[in-house]
Amino acid sequence: MTEHFDVAIIGASHAGAHAAITLRERGFTGSVLLIGEEPVLPYDRPSLSKAYMLGSISIERILLRDADYWAEHGIDLLLDTPAAHLDPAAATVRLGDGRTIGYGRCILATGGHVRTLACPGADLPGIHMVRSLVDVDAIRAALKPGMRAAIVGAGYVGLEAAAVLRELGHEVVVVETQDRVLARVTGPVLSAFVERKHRAHGVDFRFGRHVAAIEGDGRAEHVLLSSGERLAADIVIVGIGIAPRTELAEAAGLACDGGVLVDQCGRTSDPAIFAIGDCARHPNSYAGGLWRLESVQHATASAEVAADAIMGNPRNYDALPTFWSDQYDMRIQSAGILRGACEALVRGDPDSGAFSIFYLKDGAVVALDAVNSPRDFMGGRALVQERLRVPPELLADTAVPVRQIVKQLVS
């Protein structure tokens, strides 16, 4: 017999879990099932490459809710169980163990696959990813005092891992195909600052090179670069991004193109099925078209929009994209999507370790990076959200709080 749920959510990480939580918080009284591949309760994934890898917090500290919460709120959890097939015509999900679940509405929160190296030796033991609890537990178990680590990718995940490994006393070299760190997400000013911070902590870099091969006798021992240089490595960590998991959606005949395509309410091409979080490609006014975001903010915002639509209160997704990263004593907070040529206006002194960068296009603030400047970030979000035009000399004046600038402009 097929068990039926009013809402079946496929994917139990941040987006999927928040969708279930939001439905209950909004007063949804129907049955809710949360299906997850991992055997653990839903947890905060961004913490994996930061405090959890460092060992300063336990798994209990990063759980989104404790075990009692799910039972008390009538949310059924089906963990350690992958979804094998989605049938929109029958409104069913076939699970990996052969069971079939019927649904009234389905939410896809399938996330993404980590991108892997495509070179000889890429399958050798000793090569690690940073995506799941199992991945980071494997890294922690592999680390021994004084190891040499090669990190492939100078995005946020790679840099966060580099910071953790340096704090643990390991040698670190980061390999990046671009000519600077964070090249895909920010401008040269912040890139240069972050690189200086890492170099001051002993991290080495190789820019403009890709990995030609991983070499070793039964496990990874060297990383061969396209330049011919061979880096000794006791452990290799690959952080080169993720690809959206669209297999279920594609097999079900849902429209996909660089992610599961959804409308402004999170609906897929089947009105009974929604897609949220990393796997979804949605209309985003800040990007000026369809966009796929990977952030906690997007996971929660898209989950809330889908939950509202399911409850008969549809609204358009209009959340401001925000991101954050912790590295050493440095907290980076960003808002907006940096696209195309922009003027970068630096507020404050980078040498002080606390400053902000506002990105202006045609005089309007379109994005913001704040380093150890939470007040600038909190005030600056409104500038980005409203795309306000600010006199550059006013924005650069650190004696005037950003919140005050916002009040002046909107009054």
Image: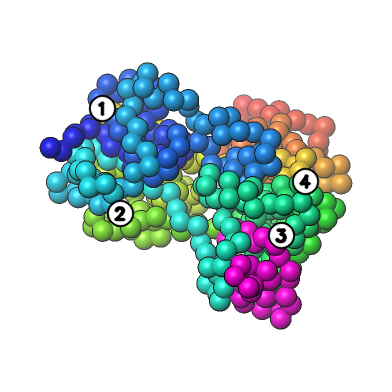
Please state the extent of the stretch shown in magenta in the rendering. Answer: 212-240
Circle 1 sits in a helix, a strand or a loop, which is it?
Answer: loop
Distance of mark 1 from mark 4, alpha carbons?
Answer: 46 Å
Distance of mark 2 from mark 4, alpha carbons?
Answer: 40 Å
Which quadrant is home to the C terminus? top right
Determine whether 182 is above or below 268 in the image. Answer: below
Q: Which residue is mark 4?
A: 167
| In the displayed structure image, the side of residue 178 where residue 75 appears, left or right | left
In the image, what residue type sits under mark 4? Glu
In the image, what residue type sits under mark 2? Leu
Residue 113: numbered disc: none
Decide: few, some or many residues near mark 1? Use Cα within 10 Å; few <14, some 14-19, many ≥20: some
Determine whether 12 is above or below 366 in the image. Answer: above
In the image, what residue type sits under mark 3? Ala
Q: Which residue is mark 3?
A: 149
First along the sequence among labels 1 and 2: 1
Question: Residue lying farthest front?
Answer: 218
First along the sequence among labels 1 and 4: 1
Decide: few, some or many residues near mark 2? Use Cα within 10 Å; few <14, some 14-19, many ≥20: some
Circle 3 sits in a helix, a strand or a loop, which is it?
Answer: strand
Residue 165 placement (x, y as % from top left): 73, 50
Determine whether 152 is above or below 76 in the image. Answer: below
Mark nearest the camera among 1 and 4 is 4
Q: Which residue is mark 2?
A: 248
Report if the CB atoms under discs 3 and 4 are less than 8 Å apart: no
First along the sequence among labels 3 and 2: 3
Residue 31: numbered disc: 1
Q: How many marks?
A: 4
Distance of mark 3 from mark 2, alpha carbons?
Answer: 36 Å
Distance of mark 1 from mark 2, alpha carbons?
Answer: 23 Å
Distance of mark 3 from mark 1, alpha carbons?
Answer: 47 Å
